[in-house]
Image (cartoon, grey):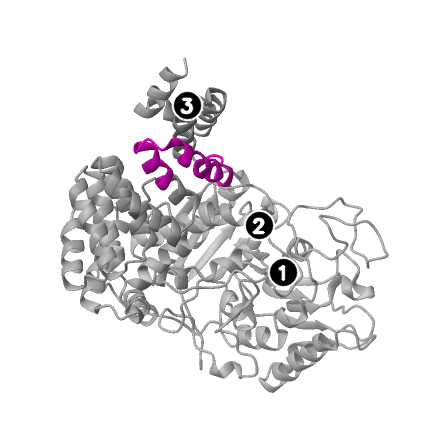
């Protein structure tokens, strides 16, 4: 089977081919926001359209995805239906640098399914998307475990923090507009667009035991830092076992939620000011934004009934009560990964916007946290950044955003490849992102002349020639790859298939296909070897290879059709019919293929 390394082959294997080859806080604007709407969720569309108008986002700053309307999404679906369309939009509009914030809407899944624990793979969709810029640059991130947040202030004072710009960071700050109902979310958007500076900062310690004492220390430190900054009159630090209460408006709130027995409530009796932010030291308060029954209330493990898999508090109740921004967790984050209130509130009062304040206080990414709220909400902002303070214009050599191009080039040159060739490749990628392919051959030819080791460009040329039926030229490009990388399994596979199927030279293809399978014993490569053997009349040797490939990839049409042809040649017509039926079930359009028509006639 022919492999298109630019589309079909596993990312990890394609990566191998490429390697061969604040003082005062300032605010950003709606121009720096990208909105994500799940078209399969009516609530998502309603909320997204409202936010778009309310904030005055550019009309094209919207990605409309189509994915599951569930709290949990499988990682493959996340990659295909959430991350990929957002990446494509950024490339198509050349806004990798200018976009700073990605805003998800109710109906976009909360959680990427995976394993639990500190070395687990479950994570919030939001936290995974923070790494998208780095992925586009070419950086590799592990799926297992959590990743240190480079923005996290830790012990540094808020005065050391700088406004979030593309100069300073490779992250996207991701928030979501969510709540129990569309009405709740529309009110949250209204509050975020017209925030107040009034209100107290309520810090509710557990105060009863030494269990999880770190959280109480952070709340105490938050009070100390706020007092030192001159905001002491705002601070209410509740140090007893009682639930914190005040008749005054509240601009900041942090507690233990249902982990504090006196806070096993859904309504805390607080009046939140527009623009109020906060959170809770609760493991699963963002597990869902579905609304529980009116008579449900949070409890301890031995208490009342669970809702959505847990007895713990829900962040949706704080949103219903009037909070404007809140952190929550889609799965167990462990205490050391929770938002630090001693950073969150001083940053917010210093003028940082909602998103900046939460991410400055967030220790880890690719983890369990979601931030609900309008990222631009900033009641204490000092000024608005100019566009040239946020990012640079396009780089004329690559036609990519300048900072993005420089970072992408920095990653690519680590393989020792010539920068001049890589810039041409980046220019081709930029044009392709805008769906312009007219200069592909010229740019790729120049790049490979300068740097023959640029295998990704050689593959792109070979793929281009295959699409034009210029098979001799494609074969030449595969041979050029193998001249600099003799063990390149993709090139060996594609060369063998092209020789055997396109140029009708199966004898020449056989040793190449055998080497390809030794180097890269994947089902698709096994299919190539088996097909070459079939063309040489050795169906008995080919059949076991195809059977193993079919077992590994039971819906791959090419493998199923090849297996059917081989089994028909061996007079195993029952199995051949099953394989043909499976191929047509996997792709009904395959009925128009010549090899399928021939097999169907043979089986009549």
Determine whether label 1 and label 3 are within 8 Å by CB: no
Q: Secondary structure at mark 3?
A: helix
Q: Number of labelled discs?
A: 3
Near mark 3 (Cα within 10 A), the count class, few <14, some 14-19 or many ≥20, is some
Determine whether label 1 and label 2 are within 8 Å by CB: no
Return the disc, 1 or 3, that comes first in the chain's sequence: 1
Return the disc, 1 or 2, that comes first in the chain's sequence: 2
Q: Secondary structure at mark 2?
A: helix
Labelled disc at residue 185: 2
Q: CA distance from mark 1 to mark 3?
A: 58 Å
User: In this view, which residue lies farthest toward the top?
Assistant: 604
Determine whether label 2 and label 3 are within 8 Å by CB: no
Whole-percent x, y for residue 496 in the image: 28, 44
Magenta range is: 528-555
Q: Is residue 262 left or right of residue 153?
A: right
Q: At 22% from the left edge and 41% from the top edge, which residue is drawn?
A: 466
- Mark nearest the camera among 2 and 3 is 3
Q: Which residue in the structure is indicated by mark 3?
A: 568
Q: Which residue in the structure is indicated by mark 1?
A: 328
Near mark 2 (Cα within 10 A), the count class, few <14, some 14-19 or many ≥20, is many
In the displayed structure, 552 sits above or below 570; it is: below
Question: Is residue 29 visible from the viewing direction of this image?
Answer: no
Question: Is residue 417 visible from the viewing direction of this image?
Answer: yes
Q: At 83% from the left edge and 74% from the top edge, which residue is drawn?
A: 208
23 within the magenta span: no
- 556 and 187: which is toward the camera: 556
Whole-percent x, y for residue 102 in the image: 45, 57
| Quadrant (top left/top right/bottom left/bottom right) for the N terminus | top left
User: In this view, which residue lies farthest toward the bottom?
Assistant: 228
């Amino acid at each position: 089977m022919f492999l298109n390394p630019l589309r079909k082959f596993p990312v990890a294997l394609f990566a191998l081919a490429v390697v061969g080859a604040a003082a005062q806080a300032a605010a950003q604007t709606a121009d720096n926001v990208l909105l994500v709407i799940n078209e399969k969720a009516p609530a998502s569309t309603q909320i997204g359209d409202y936010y778009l108008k309310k904030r005055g986002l550019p009309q094209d700053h919207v990605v409309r995805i189509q994915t599951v309307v569930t709290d949990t999404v499988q990682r493959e679906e996340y990659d295909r239906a959430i991350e990929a369309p957002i990446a494509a939009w950024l490339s198509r509009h050349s806004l990798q640098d200018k976009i700073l914030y990605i805003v998800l809407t109710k109906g976009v899944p909360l959680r990427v399914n995976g394993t639990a624990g500190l070395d687990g793979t479950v994570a919030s969709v939001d936290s995974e998307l923070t790494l998208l810029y780095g992925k586009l640059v070419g950086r590799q991130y592990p799926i297992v475990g959590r990743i240190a947040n480079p923005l996290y202030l830790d012990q540094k004072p808020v005065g050391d923090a700088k406004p979030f710009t593309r100069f300073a960071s490779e992250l996207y700050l991701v928030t979501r507009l969510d709540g129990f109902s569309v009405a709740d979310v529309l009110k949250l958007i209204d509050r975020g667009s017209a925030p107040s500076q009034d209100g107290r900062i309520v810090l509710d310690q557990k105060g009863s035991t030494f269990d999880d004492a770190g959280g109480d220390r952070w709340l105490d430190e938050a009070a100390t830092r706020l007092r030192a900054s001159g905001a002491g009159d705002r601070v209410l630090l509740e140090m007893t076992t009682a639930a914190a209460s005040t008749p005054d408006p509240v601009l900041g709130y942090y507690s233990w939620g249902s982990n504090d027995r006196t806070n096993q409530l859904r309504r805390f009796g607080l009046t939140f000011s527009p623009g109020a932010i906060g959170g809770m030291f609760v493991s699963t308060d963002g597990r869902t934004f579905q609304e529980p029954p009116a008579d449900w209330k949070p409890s301890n493990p031995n208490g009342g009934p669970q809702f959505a898999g847990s007895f713990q508090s829900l962040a949706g109740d704080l949103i219903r009560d009037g909070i404007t921004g809140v952190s929550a967790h889609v799965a167990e984050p462990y205490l050391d990964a929770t938002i630090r209130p001693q950073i969150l509130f001083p940053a917010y009062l210093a003028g940082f916007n909602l998103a900046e304040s939460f991410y400055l206080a967030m220790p880890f990414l690719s983890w369990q946290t979601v931030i609900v709220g309008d990222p631009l909400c900033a009641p204490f902002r000092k000024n608005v950044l100019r566009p040239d303070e946020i990012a640079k214009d396009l780089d004329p050599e690559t036609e990519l955003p300048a900072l993005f191009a420089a970072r992408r080039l920095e990653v690519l040159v680590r393989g020792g490849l010539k920068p001049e060739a890589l810039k041409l490749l980046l220019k081709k990628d930029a044009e392709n992102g805008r769906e312009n392919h007219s200069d592909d051959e010229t740019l790729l030819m120049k790049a490979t002349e300068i740097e023959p080791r640029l295998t990704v460009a050689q593959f792109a040329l070979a793929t281009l020639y295959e699409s034009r039926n210029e098979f001799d030229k494609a074969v030449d490009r595969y041979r050029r790859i193998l001249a600099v990388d003799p063990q390149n399994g993709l090139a060996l596979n594609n060369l063998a298939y092209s020789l055997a199927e396109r140029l009708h030279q199966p004898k020449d293809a056989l040793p190449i296909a055998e080497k390809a399978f030794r180097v890269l014993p994947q089902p698709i490569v096994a299919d190539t070897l088996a097909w070459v053997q079939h063309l040489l009349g050795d169906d008995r040797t080919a059949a076991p290879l195809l059977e193993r490939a079919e077992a590994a990839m039971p819906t791959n049409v090419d493998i199923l059709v090849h297996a059917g042809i081989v089994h028909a040649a061996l007079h195993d017509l029952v199995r051949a019919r099953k394989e043909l039926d499976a191929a047509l079930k996997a792709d009904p359009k395959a009925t128009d293929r010549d090899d399928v028509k021939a097999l169907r006639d043979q089986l009549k």
